Image: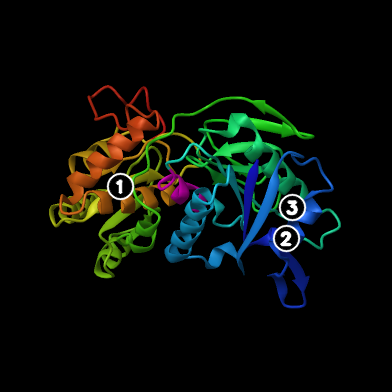
Amino acid sequence: MQLRLIGTGGTIASRSTPTGRVASVTVKELLETARAFPVPECAEVTCVEMGLRASFSLGLPDLAALAGAVGESLRDGADAVVITHGTDSMEETAFALSLVHADDRPIVLTGAQRPADDPAADGPRNLATALTWAAHPAARGHGVSAVFDGAVWPAIGLRKTDTLAPAAFGVPGRGPVARVDDGRVRLIGRPPRPAPLISADDLGRLPRVDIVPLYVGCDTALLDAAVAAGARGVVLCAFGAGNAPPDVTEAVARLVADGVAVAVASRVPAGATSAAYGAGGGADLLRAGAVFAADLSPWHLRLLLAAALHRAEGRGPEGAAVVIRDWLADAGHHDAAHPWSGHHDAAHPGG
């Protein structure tokens, strides 16, 4: 079995310096430290260094380059690709790769919460676990996943749930697809896997989509500023199950009419959006032309909306909305929004 290990930096590759942690450990060095733990003996691992960067400094062109390197690795005959990556934006990189990856061969991301020179560094074990999962037959067909603290998480829905703890990731409202303990894989589930929407090259030229947070007392200033800066789409990080103040909802109707796509995610960590409330809430946002996106985080929805706009080029907000709804259905979300019917207040008391 041929495994390709791609290093991008992050805490897993960092050492402490007087000015803060800096990525300076090569991916070959990381592989050697991982061999202190169970790794698949049948696998031949080749290493590619793509840079020693903190993940909070990455941009979409970097993700396009990484996706290109993954594709090249698969064309070279790799049976799976493992990527070491910083935790700050791993959830976005994993999701972006899932929008591109069409092959049955697995792509696995991992990293660390503690630097390489920490006495209790978690990177070596995480990397050994990621290699074990990537080499296991059960990983085929899972698409893109992230391995952390013994758990294997799907890319879709992935969130960093703790800033410092070793168990840094989760998929709120769902669960892991597998557990890996001392080199043994225990498969738990296989979530639906949508078809890719874009190519690796497309990642570097997606249209601008901004995220606008909603909060008590907010107005339309950030929404208008995003569009003025060139955003072709906006994701509302909305209240509750997808609600907004009436003046924001009125602005959404105006923007959609002007050709700007608007999608709705929740600022709540877990649970799906639902267009249940009037008076400027989700039901009115839906009528204004916004698209609801189940339980996707604002960060994932931003990438999905950008990909949908690229895929539906020339078809405006409604074309992008159709792409998103179809993608959500393929991901297992067949009822992404519930238009208000007059009977939702009792069922949705959280407004």
Q: Which residues are magenta?
A: 93-101
Instruction: Identify the residue at the far front of this view.
Output: 76
Q: CA–CA distance between discs 2 and 3? A: 13 Å
Write the residue at 81% across / 48% down.
35
Pointer 2 with pointer 3, Cβ within 8 A: no
Quadrant location, the N terminus: top right
Q: Nearer the viewer, residue 225 or 101?
A: 101
Tag of residue 28:
2
The reply to whether residue 145 is visible in this rendering is: yes
Q: Work out whether mark 2 precedes mark 3 in sequence or the reverse, and give the earlier one.
A: 2
Tag of residue 263:
1
Dot 3, crowdedness within 10 Å: few (<14), some or many (≥20)?
many
Tag of residue 123:
3
Left or right: residue 273 compared with residue 28: left
Tag of residue 190:
none
The reply to whether residue 244 is visible in this rendering is: no
Write the residue at 26% across / 49% down.
311
